Image: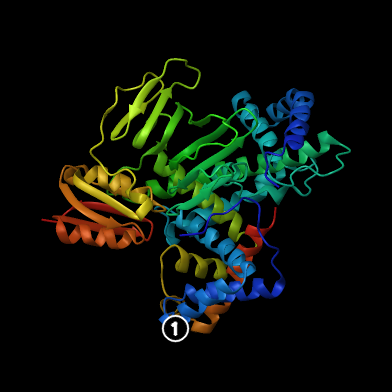
């Protein structure tokens, strides 16, 4: 788990470090790196913040090719060659318009752009801890984007997407704290709570661990109080009445996914948040139930464990396109 | 410096007010579709919020906006080409489940990114990179499959990973 970090503190990377990082990365992908060499790599990364920064740059590229959902080399070669024939024609469309410098902007996909304009983020499978200036602690779960806006009137945490656990500190300046999502505005009253907002369609889920949280719509004035041990869901239409929390929504902070008689379909959907690529569950087995506590550090191992404890088969179409289906025959 | 620097925001807001309708018009003439033109115009301004996107002395804002808009147009057309090629290729393969639009979008995203990443590398280096990174083959397995030595595979990977590194660095 990475240490608390501030945005924009990337050290400069020289040619030597670049060469070393590339050599390490190439070796790490060989499929035959010995534990001793893995240890040496870890040592190299820890020796210098520049090393770690260079390594992370490649690790994030790896994440990109792992976003590779359902794409294997045969499909990629097919498509890229076919599309390659179109390239000249495409460029012709712009001829005369003065084609200079433009290619600079390639590969800035939506996530990268959003990430760049957000203060704090955690990538797929990452967890990150932040300590804010007032002492408030925030943990970011996988695929999360958070903006922090503190001014003289208020402390605002804006969760654009993802999931956070907030442990509040009282502010010496007495400013109120708000957590905002696209669907809700939360006003904690001395507390620890978990907020999750993955899509506007699902809305925001709030689960309160200690203390209380006052909930309203983004522009609303009416507040509902959610107490410790309760959760609620807020979407475009309404705020659900608070109910008793029966799950373990904070388990990810300990690196665990905990299931208690959970539907396999829901479990797989949950697991997919922590894995790049596509992970699907065949509807035929989605209603099987499972119970257990699973370390999130190795999701492939969790998948392997499923096949051992349930009558299911886990099929890898590619490394990043996995389906959980019924046993054959 | 974080991208939410207030002076940068102010600059971008001014640029937006003064040049947005004009840029949108330019894009609409290129694309012939007003919704797509609106999206790309919006996107052009969002790019300005990236760290270091706006040069210190911006003499000719329109030329600068056009540079960005043009590259977005190239990306847009390129993406469309890849999307078509991809839908063809997927249709030709049997899937055990029908792909949802979200899955398809993810696959197209990945291919678009790979296209950019691998552009400029030789076909053999590309092939080796894809076998390693997409199929998860070890270097000896790749060497066997392509009839090469392991050190040739290693050299190709060094080249490809070097390109990845420079790609991730440049902005």
The residue lying at 29 percent from left, 26 percent from top is: A242
The answer to whether A74 appears left or right of A8 in the picture is left
Residue A93, position in %: x, y?
Answer: 70, 40
Q: Nearer the viewer, residue B157 or B10?
A: B10
**Which quadrant of the figure contains the C terminus of chain A?**
bottom left
The residue lying at 26 percent from left, 46 percent from top is: A267
Query: How many marks are shown on the rendered structure?
Result: 1
The residue lying at 69 percent from left, 66 percent from top is: A13
Give the vertical position of B95 relative to B63 (above or below): below
Give the vertical position of A113 relative to A218 (above or below): below
Residue A79, position in %: x, y?
Answer: 49, 53
Residue that mark 1 sits on: A36
Visible residue check, residue B157: no
Q: Nearer the viewer, residue A276 or A96?
A: A276
The answer to whether A27 appears left or right of A15 in the picture is left
Residue A43, position in %: x, y?
Answer: 53, 76
Give the vertical position of B151 relative to A254 (above or below): below
The residue lying at 71 percent from left, 70 percent from top is: A14
Residue B35 sits in which quadrant? top right
Give the vertical position of B36 relative to A123 (above or below): above
């Amino acid at each position: 788990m990475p240490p608390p970090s501030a945005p924009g503190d990337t050290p400069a990377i020289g040619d030597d470090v670049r060469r070393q990082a590339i050599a390490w990365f190439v070796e790490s992908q060989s499929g035959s790196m010995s534990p001793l060499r893995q240890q040496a790599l870890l040592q190299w990364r820890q020796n210098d913040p520049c090393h770690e920064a260079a390594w992370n740059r490649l690790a994030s590229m790896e994440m990109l090719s792992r976003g590779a959902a359902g794409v294997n080399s045969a499909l990629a070669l097919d498509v890229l060659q076919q599309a390659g024939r179109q390239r000249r024609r495409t460029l012709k469309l712009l001829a005369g318009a003065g084609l200079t410098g433009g290619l600079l902007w390639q590969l800035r996909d939506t996530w990268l752009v959003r990430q760049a304009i957000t203060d704090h983020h955690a990538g797929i499978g990452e967890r990150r801890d932040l300590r804010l200036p007032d002492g408030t602690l925030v943990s970011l779960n996988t695929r999360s984007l958070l903006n922090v806006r503190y001014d003289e009137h208020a402390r605002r945490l804006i969760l654009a997407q993802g999931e956070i656990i907030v442990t509040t500190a009282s502010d010496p300046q007495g400013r109120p704290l708000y957590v905002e999502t696209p669907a809700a505005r939360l006003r904690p009253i001395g507390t620890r709570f978990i907020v999750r907002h993955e899509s506007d369609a699902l809305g925001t889920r709030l689960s309160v661990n200690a203390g209380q949280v006052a909930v309203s719509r983004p522009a609303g004035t009416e507040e509902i109080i959610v107490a410790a041990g309760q959760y609620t869901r807020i979407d475009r239409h309404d705020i659900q009445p608070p109910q008793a929390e029966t799950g373990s929504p904070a388990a990810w902070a300990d690196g665990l996914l905990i299931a208690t008689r959970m539907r396999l379909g829901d479990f797989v959907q949950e697991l997919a948040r922590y894995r790049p690529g596509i992970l699907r569950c065949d509807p035929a087995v989605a209603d099987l139930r499972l119970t257990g506590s699973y370390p999130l550090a190795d999701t492939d191992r969790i998948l392997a464990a499923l096949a051992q404890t349930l009558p299911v088969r886990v099929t890898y179409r590619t490394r990043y396109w996995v389906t959980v289906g019924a046993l054959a025959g | 410096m974080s991208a939410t620097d207030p002076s940068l925001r102010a600059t971008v807001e001014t640029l937006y007010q003064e040049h947005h309708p004009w840029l949108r018009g330019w894009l609409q003439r290129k694309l012939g579709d007003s919704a797509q033109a609106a999206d790309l115009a919006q996107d052009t301004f969002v790019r300005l919020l990236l760290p270091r996107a706006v040069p210190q002395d911006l003499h000719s804002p329109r030329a600068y906006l056009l540079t960005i808009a043009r590259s977005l147009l190239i990306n847009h057309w390129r993406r469309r080409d890849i999307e078509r090629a991809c839908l063809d290729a997927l249709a030709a393969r049997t899937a055990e489940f029908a792909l949802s639009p979200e899955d398809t979008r993810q696959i197209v995203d990945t291919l678009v990114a790979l296209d950019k990443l691998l552009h400029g590398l030789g076909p053999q280096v590309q092939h080796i990179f894809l076998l390693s990174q997409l199929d998860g083959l070890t270097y000896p397995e790749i060497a066997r499959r392509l009839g090469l030595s392991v050190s040739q595979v290693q050299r190709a990977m060094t080249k490809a990973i070097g390109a990845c590194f420079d790609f991730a660095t440049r902005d």
